[in-house]
Amino acid sequence: MDPIRNPFAPGAGQRPPELAGRERELKAFEVVLERVARGRPERSLVLTGLRGVGKTVLLGELRSMAVRRGWGAGKIEARPDAELRRPLSAALHRAIRDLAVRHRAPDRVETVLGVLKAFALKASKPDAKLRDRWQPGIDAPAAQGRADSGDIEIDLVELFTDVAELAADVGTGVALLIDEIQDLQPDDVSALCAACHELSQSGAPLVVVGAGLPHVPAVLSASKSYSERLFRYARIDRLDRADADLAVLAPIEREEAGIEPEALDALFDASGGYPYFIQAYSKAAWDAAPDDPITVKDVQVAAPEAEAELAVGFFGSRYERATPAEREYLLAMAELTQGKDEASSTADVAVYLGRKPSSLSPARDNLMKKGLVYSAERGQIAFTVPHFGHYLLGRD
């Protein structure tokens, strides 16, 4: 069929297929927005799950929901080698601009922007030369004595409080969305928990929505013992059969095309219900189909093309980040699980490789830092990427 009309191409369509089956999360966030806007206490939200289940897309939709309700909203992606101040400043700057459109007191907005600028300027080291200091691009004089102590925990509490009060002035709130939240540095995680705790105590209209890998709850609880009371955790998993079919059918029907039931069976078997894979295989099947409807033969012909694309862009890009020692560890995990999406025992990995467990700790820890594996529970290790073990066993 016409590749130009392909509804599974990246960015195509009004509603990406990854959002099929996420109605529960969308409704839950609607309740959060309503409760916070009414001044009632509500926990922040954290989405957890493997890569490829659509967390980032869902996070974007939650941001859009907040914006449609007149909230200020900003989104960032955490990185292991970057501190929180700079990206957070940019995200909150955008949120404040959203609120400024509705606020009737420009001086009040400028005051909060001044606090944000003071917070942002602390991203530069005190001994940095003037030419090397980061300028946040905030058109307001920096405040003094507010959110500028240099202690991220103190400063973040003060900044969140002021931004939330600005939102309260116009009867809305602020949503701060953080993707890859497990990559925040320990001090930043601690500060974020402290700020969320302060907000929950005061009922201030600012909510944090995070998304990350399955071990995020453990990362947060290791930082602050009370973190389980601050966040509502939502596990985002693969789609069941009905929702997976909807993810395929809805985009196709929007293009007034069709697909045979046997082709739907083949797509579900190939994708395992993971939204990213559903999109990849469906896109390839659409391009391979000479006529309408898409048939099971079209899916079979297209599967190698989809798998080749996944091998390069989804699996290969991650595998290439691993060192030889780390690749050895990954392959051992794949062999032990026979390529299935299951956890491995760290002790079994050591036995398989004929090594002492302590000698493998550096490779395992580095793989965790790179986001390739996570610890499902003590003594267990699993891939963060679905079907990664199958990919590794299929390499030449």
Image (tube, rainbow, N blue to C red):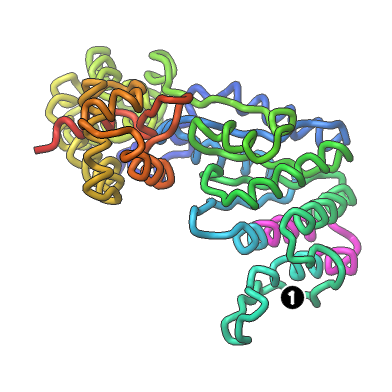
| Residue visible at 34% across and 21% down in the picture | 342
Q: Is residue 69 left or right of residue 355?
A: right
Q: Quadrant of residue 105?
A: bottom right
| Residue visible at 21% across and 36% down in the picture | 306
Which class describes the residues within 10 Å of circle 1: few (<14), some (14-19), or many (20+)? few
Kind of residue sitting beneath label 1: Asp
Q: Quadrant of residue 347?
A: top left
| Residue visible at 79% across and 31% down in the picture | 42
Position of the N terminus, as image quadrant, is top left
**For the magenta stretch, what is the residue range?**
91-112
As rendered, which of 371 and 332 lies closer to the eye? Answer: 332
Is most of the magenta stretch helix, strand or loop? helix
Q: Position of residue 46 (x, y in %)?
A: 61, 34
Where is 196 relative to 129, above or below? above
Taking the image as drawn, is residue 7 in sight?
no
Q: Is residue 278 left or right of residue 201?
A: left
- Residue 84 drawn in magenta: no
Secondary structure at badge 1 equals loop
